[in-house]
Image (tube, rainbow, N blue to C red):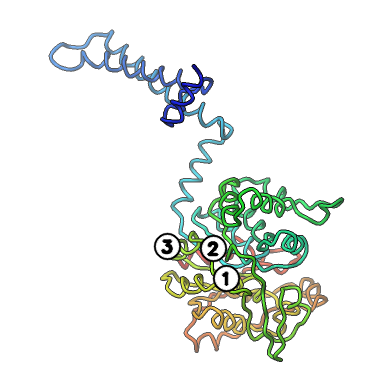
Amino acid sequence: MWKRSEGLFRRFPALRWLYPGMRVKRYALLAGLGVLLLALGLAPFLPPPPPGPWALALTLLGLLLLVGGIRAMNRSMLSALMEPGEVPERVYVRRRLEGGPKVVAFGGGTGLSRVLRGLKEHTAGTTAIVAVTDDGGSTGRLRLTFGLPAVGDLVDCLAALSDHPGLAQLLAHRFDRGELEGHTFGNLFLVTLNQVSGDFAEAIRQANAILNLRGQVLPATPEAVRLKARFQDGEEVEGEVALRRKGGRIREVLLVPEPKEVMPEALKAIREADLLVLGPGSLYTSVIPSFLPGPLREALGKARAPLVYVVNLMTEPGETEGYTAYDHYKAIAHHLGRRPEVVLVHTAPIPEGVLARYRAEGRFPVAFDPRPFAIDGVRVVEGDFREEGLLAQHDPGKVVAALLKLV
């Protein structure tokens, strides 16, 4: 008998609400009884007979049963997903955020994930397109073993856009012993999804669905590519780690092999975007690699949404020593083939204690001169975008507040 019923449920999915133990049928019957009593109670109100007190009582009882049945049925269904007290707030937040602007943010590492944490408080329409060329640490070891794109920055961005407050700590957990030493749970999670699905793009889609994001996180390409740098002195190196070790002025970076595939979701997001954001983040190893695949650059060139570049607060050894804000902007325009219409620059003083800490690492504030931007006709948004504390890093709230004014 059950096998016949199971076949019927598969054939007609809507009937799955009738599964035993769902605690839905009883409330549906209660609501149905309410409709019946409501109809009986309202009938005498229709001309010509005048209503009696029994009709009013039936009407009120039917209304109470209808409302109570629907309310209990909703609570029964939603209780399987979340605590009853969370339902109104979750629904309100989701509905409010779904009406927010569609923002596509490019980059990788800490810079992009911080911007995403700010954006998820204002919109559920964020798409993060993440560089996948990192070859150091846990990510580098997993790349060598499984032949995957880099997963580390993807994990950071997935955690940043998740709706669950405890997920970031879980994904960032790093094992400290045995064969898993040095690996994070998040990195292994993506590798596992890839092994199960047999396709990296599909693994990312599954991760987005499982983690209940306020938006989506996508790789710049689902192909395993490496970063190649050409320096002003004519030397070429492959790999992010080798790039930083080499040091010196970089002429250009490119991906090898040249990727042929990007995810269609990324192209769709760019076409429909209200705002396109580059950075902040390492210029040559995070921001630029995130848009290097040809289809992405072509889509960005055709996109009608304004393009904003968020300049780093500090220079980086082995990558941007001596770079001004204008040097950062020119490198972006050269590799993209499109000039950002707006550049966001931190111009407020940085405490001396913070500067001394970064000086010891060979890092200095990015110098800013508004004159070359004015000549190029680029709008510059100046302000205090640093987060209070011991580090020179962008404040998600301040940056996002400035970005949303541009939509």
How many numbered marks, from 0 up?
A: 3
Q: Nearer the viewer, mark 1 or mark 2?
A: 1
From the image, tell me which residue sits under label 1.
Answer: 259
Q: Quick one: SS at disc 1?
A: loop
Q: Position of residue 255 (x, y in %)?
A: 62, 75
From the image, tell me which residue sits under label 2.
Answer: 401
Q: Position of residue 242 (x, y in %)?
A: 76, 76
Q: Quadrant location of residue 238?
A: bottom right
Label 3: few (<14), some or many (≥20) within 10 Å? Answer: some
Q: Who comes first in sequence, dot 3 or dot 1?
A: 1
From the image, tell me which residue sits under label 3.
Answer: 272
276 vs 114, left or right, is: left
Q: Quick one: SS at disc 2?
A: helix
Residue at screen point 62% across, 67% down: 131
Q: Amino acid at mark 1?
A: Pro
Q: Position of residue 10 (x, y in %)?
A: 46, 30
In the image as oriented, which residue stretches furthest toward the left? 48
